[in-house]
Image (cartoon, rainbow, N blue to C red):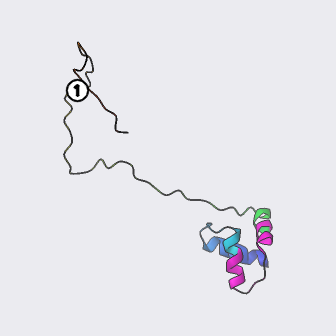
Amino acid sequence: MLFAHIKDKFEASNRAYGSRRIAAELSADGLNAGRHRVVRLMRDNSLKVERKKKFKRTTDSHHNKPVALNFLEQDFTCTGPNQKWGADIS
């Protein structure tokens, strides 16, 4: 019976709530269930939190800003020092 409530809370949270949150939700609903009991029931029934990574955009290639000209055209050869300089901004 208690496991059915745990599974309902777990699925309602899109498999994101762990034992602490589920135990808090159950106690808010008036069900007596300690966190360690919730942990045991979740572990025995293979209920594991699926962590979702947030998408982080690192490059915006579709912009309207000016792009610097490529004067070297990938030709890095030179006849002496201090003729061509390069930098890495990463």
Residue extending farthest to the top is 79
Of 64 and 86, nearer the camera is 86
Give the residue displayed 71% in from the left and 64% down from the top: 47
Classify 17 as above or below 65. below
- Left or right relative to 64: residue 18: right
Classify 16 as above or below 77. below
Q: Give the magenta-colored segment's residue range.
A: 23-40
Q: Is residue 47 magenta?
A: no
Q: Is label 1 in a helix, a strand or a loop?
A: loop
Residue 40 picture quarter: bottom right
Report the magenta stretch's main SS.
helix
- Left or right relative to 61: residue 57: right
Classify 26 as above or below 65. below
Residue 10 picture quarter: bottom right
Q: Position of residue 33 (x, y in %)?
A: 78, 78
Q: Position of residue 87 (x, y in %)?
A: 31, 32
Residue 32 picture quarter: bottom right
